[in-house]
Image (cartoon, rainbow, N blue to C red):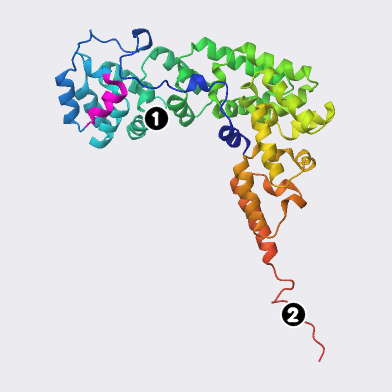
Amino acid sequence: MLWKLLLRSQPCRLCSFRKMPLASKSRPPLACFIYTTDHQSNQEDKRTVEKLYKFSVDVRKIRRLKGWVLFEKETYVEEIADVLQQLGADEAAIASILERCPEAIVCSPATFNTQRELWQLVCKNEQELVKLIEQFPESFFTVKDQETQKLNIQFFQELGLKNVVISRFLTTASNIFHNPIEKNKQMISILQESYLNLGGSEANMKVWLLKLLSQDPFILLNSSAAIKETLEFLQEQGFANSEILQLLSKLKAFLFQPCPGSIQNSMSFCKNTFKCTDHDLKQLVLKCPAILYYSVPVLEERIQGLLEEGISIAQIKETPMVLELTPQIVQYRIRKLNSLGYRIKDGHLGNLNGTKKEFEANFGKIQAKKGRPLFNPVAPLNVEE
């Protein structure tokens, strides 16, 4: 549950690396562009435009998105459409791919085939491959360092990551495949070493590592210094190795997203808000590790939302996991519980916690209990005549 709530609540410090820049009508600087193309003309290439119309592509969308491709003298509209068709894409899918990723038309067939071979290393069949291209055309047509990509795919397979996970990385975390293979190997080594140094067992390390990577592959974009800095900071705060391992097992990659300064601010805010001793603060964090991840404004908003619902600071301190819920989720769940006559501010906050599925199951139990008759109607009655 925790990782879903964390993802929903707050962007991480790596988001600036994840988000693609807004598209522009003009051609980007050559240093930023991944294809080698011929000189540009001052007019759109009519043959390119006509070929796009032939495949029912909305050229107006391309002009708005990345109009520079229409000025290129060497394009491969028909060739790319043909290979996509051979993979099983229909006309509507081909048009959609070219509209959403205009760079595809300047990708040569040879480059396309190399990219296809790479992706087929993790795709079960061509049907799965073309489905991924339809959903994530920019990831597929962002073609660079193909040999590095291949080495990283093979490395992740050797680590034990399933192909379905690696294919998800290709579509949503493609930057990690452009890391030099040595950089990714070094980061994996640092993570394994840190886990063992904190008291983790060799037997559990592989499972832990694969879960961490599956949850947030962007951890590979961190520096080894940032990983060590965070762990050393927690040790300085008085957390024992076993406690840091506990936090790491729960938060996994999220533990390394905020910098130590941000973690310090969040801990200081909680210490002042809940009037904690250092020992109490540690217990609070161990109960709700997300405190380390959330920024002060997020914690402030969530605590204020709970107070507005009539919940006391003492109740939050007793059940800090409730801070994992957004104010909107808290309001929704309290309304549902109130509909059964359950006054959350007078009771324990445990009934608010959990994933959506867990809450609904718990709500169903409370509902059933409220509607249960005081006696069993099918039980025999001892009646004296």
How would you rate the neighbour count of disc 2 (Cα within 10 Å): few for under 14, some for 14-19, many for 20 or more? few
Q: Which of 65 and 308 lies nearest the eye of the viewer?
A: 308
* Quarter residue 69 falls in: top left
Residue 329 in which image quadrant: top right
How far from the left and from the top, in percent, is residue 318?
A: 78, 41
Q: Is residue 367 magenta?
A: no
Q: Residue at x 66, y 62 (%)?
A: 368
**Relative to 284, is 57 on the left or the right?**
left
Report whether 64 appears left or right of 19.
left
Does 63 appear in magenta? Answer: yes
Residue at 80% over, 83% down: 382
Task: Tell me residue 361's x, y (percent).
Answer: 63, 53
User: 31 or 120, which lies in front?
Assistant: 31
Kind of residue indicated by mark 2: Pro
Total marks shown come to 2
Residue 380: which numbered mark, if any? 2
Residue 308 got which mark?
Answer: none
Q: Position of residue 217 (x, y in %)?
A: 53, 24
Look at mark 1 in the image and give the residue it sits on. 123
Q: Nearer the viewer, mark 1 or mark 2?
A: 2
Task: Tell me where the magenta segment starts and ends, as one range.
Answer: 57-67
Please identify the quadrant where the N terminus is shown. top right
Secondary structure state at the residue bearing disc 2: loop
